[in-house]
DNA sequence: TATTGTTATACTCTATAACTATA
DNA sequence: TATAGTTATAGAGTATAACAATA
């Protein structure tokens, strides 16, 4: 049975019928799409603990570096000092993080997790670990090693 | 020669001294960092033709799909119709793209490259090809294949 | 003079509701 | 009713300049 003109037009209008091979052959394009996809899925999952990915990263950094200051966090995550202020302030208002003014250098404010922050971080780590295992299951052990290696080299470009 | 207190403090304050291994072990984190790095470098290079990556992608899609409409572009690139309007309008104002109202369905506007748009696209393709070759040189042929495969699987998650 | 952290501000990107004109 | 495209608007994320407090 031949397609009528209307069906033909509908198929032609399908996103699937759009020729995208020139874009899909670009690593930069694929990397952006994959990153966006992963980021959105992680945002969804972390909503269970009311944390955004950047907030999770900050809690991990504080937990791994007791007394770390905002400049160090900004340097590590690539966030400028002005843009960090609001994020940290929100974590403090939620009583997940506390500030302590340094006695050696009174410009510096050392950051620590509160008991509640540490508790929430454990919960968040469970979510993130499960999330990472989902990726691993999709790409395999070998793919994982190769992907890590490639991403490291790209960051050194 | 032992470090004095001041040098010691400076080293401790270094971004390099911040313990980040828990984050760096996360694929999602590495993927985000690599994507950001690549995106910034591409933005820099495409400034030579006054195009942003998304504008380049749109020109490629139009060139590969003469008469494509905005909904199709939005579906392909994951951009909502309202957010596409401004981008397309800018390309039209720059005389790189022209609109043609469909005679079959007067809601639809078919998009085409102008001669100037086609010329600029050729120039941009040169930049992008060189950029991709730089990535390839950094990660190698095998890394390239493995990376593509992994990124495709991640997008299907 | 330089550094930590802050305020203010602007610009891009993204998301949603509501509209128009067409079908 | 549904679709293509638009307007208006709000929210993130990111960038820079200028400042206070401290070293």
Image (cartoon, coloured by chain):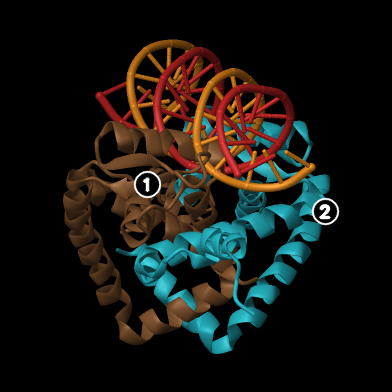
Chain colours: A brown, B cyan, C orange, D red
Is B155 above or below relative to B48?
Answer: below
Camera-side residue of A104 and A90: A104
Where does residue A79 sit, x and y in percent of width and height? 53, 47
User: Which residue appears at 49% of the width and 47% of the height?
Assistant: A104
Residue B100 shows up from this direction: no
Q: Which mark is residue A97?
A: none
Tell me which corner region of the image, top left, top right, bottom left or bottom right, holds residue A131. bottom left
What SS does tag 2 mark? helix
Tell me which corner region of the image, top left, top right, bottom left or bottom right, holds residue A34. bottom left
Where does residue B63 sit, x and y in percent of width and height? 67, 54
Where does residue A61 sit, x and y in percent of width and height? 37, 57
Camera-side residue of D6 and A8: D6
Is B136 above or below relative to A45?
Answer: below
User: Which residue appears at 82% of the width and 47% of the height?
Assistant: B115
Where does residue A130 sit, x and y in percent of width and height? 20, 65
**Residue beneath disc 1:** A111
Q: CA distance from mark 1 to mark 2?
A: 54 Å
The N terminus of chain A lies in quadrant? bottom left
User: Which residue appears at 30% of the width and 54% of the height?
Assistant: A42
Residue B1 shows up from this direction: yes
Q: Which mark is residue B119?
A: 2
Co-location on one chain, circles 1 and 2: no
Is A19 above or below relative to B84?
Answer: below
The C terminus of chain A lies in quadrant? bottom right
Is A104 above or below relative to C8?
Answer: below
What SS does tag 1 mark? strand
Indicate left or right for B94 with A58 as reference: right
> Of discs 1 and 2, which sits in the foreground?
1
């Amino acid at each position: 049975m031949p397609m009528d003109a209307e069906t033909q037009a509908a198929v032609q209008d399908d996103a699937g019928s759009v020729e995208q091979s020139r874009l899909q052959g670009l690593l930069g394009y694929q990397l952006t799409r994959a990153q966006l996809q992963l980021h959105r899925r992680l945002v969804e999952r972390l909503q269970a603990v009311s944390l955004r990915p950047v907030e999770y990263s900050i809690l991990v950094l504080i937990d791994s570096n007791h007394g770390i200051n905002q400049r160090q966090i900004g340097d590590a995550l690539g966030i400028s000092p002005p843009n960090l202020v609001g994020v940290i302030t929100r974590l403090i208002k939620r009583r997940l993080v506390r500030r302590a003014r340094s006695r050696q250098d009174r410009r510096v404010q050392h950051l620590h997790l509160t008991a509640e922050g540490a508790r929430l971080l454990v919960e968040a780590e469970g979510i993130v670990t499960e999330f990472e295992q989902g990726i691993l299951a999709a790409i395999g052990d070998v793919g994982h090693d190769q992907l890590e290696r490639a991403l490291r080299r790209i960051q050194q470009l």
